[in-house]
Amino acid sequence: MKTFVLGGGCFWCLDAVYQKTRGVSSVVSGYTGGHVRNPDYYEVCSGTTGHAEVVAVTFDETVVPEEVILDMFFALHDPTTLNRQGYDVGTQYRSSMFYNTTEEKVLFEEAIERAQALWSDPIVTEVSRLPDFYEAEEVHQNYYAKFPYQGYCQVIINPKLAKARKYYSAWLTA
């Protein structure tokens, strides 16, 4: 099993897709990359903690290749916008990848190179060593499954799920 910690805007979006990905055993929404210990959602949303909203995706690489997890990441958000994903604006929504090992750092850099071929603007995804990871509050875990009819889910997450189904249907469970 392997775990990647990825930030692509609001963690609810990445969570929704990775929860439906074959070989993924867990997706934990959380915060990392900041300077405040044990931040909560409201502190992170204030933009003053330095944390990014991220997901820790644990998967079996014999079922779903590392490259698929990473390529999906770049398909699910715009990695060319600094500190912004659509209407979500602030450093907490930055495109980010947090590595534990040099091998992971290399995989992340290779994924950026692959993704750059798909984008006309330069990718601004931050690649950093993983500092402390703080699990988000329970309400944020598996958010889409809990609140599929909430407005954000309908307007923002559903199109991302549709895009994932279009390009990665072989890797999705539903």
Image (spheres, rainbow, N blue to C red):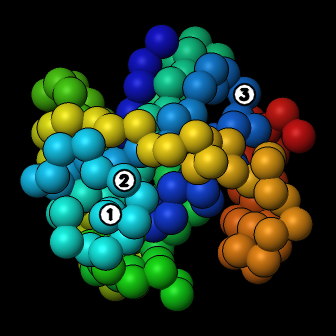
Helix, strand or loop for disc 3: loop
- Which is more N-terminal, label 3 or label 1? 3
x and y percentages locating residue 156 in the rendered image: 69, 75
Identify the residue under disc 1. 44
Q: Is residue 118 left or right of residue 168?
A: left
x and y percentages locating residue 70 in the rendered image: 46, 44
Helix, strand or loop for disc 2: loop
Q: Nearer the viewer, residue 5 or 41?
A: 41
Mark in the foreground, 2 or 1:
2
Q: CA distance from mark 2 to mark 3?
A: 30 Å
Dots 2, 1 in contact, CB < 8 A: yes
At a point 60% along the width and 56% down the height, the residue shown is 12
At a point 58% along the width and 40% down the height, the residue shown is 138
Q: Which mark is residue 22?
A: 3
Splitting the image into 4 quarters, where does residue 25 fall?
top right
Q: Is residue 163 above or below residue 23?
A: below
Q: Is residue 76 above or below residue 141?
A: below
Mark in the foreground, 1 or 3:
1
Dots 2, 3 in contact, CB < 8 A: no
Q: Which quarter of the figure is the C terminus placed in?
A: top right
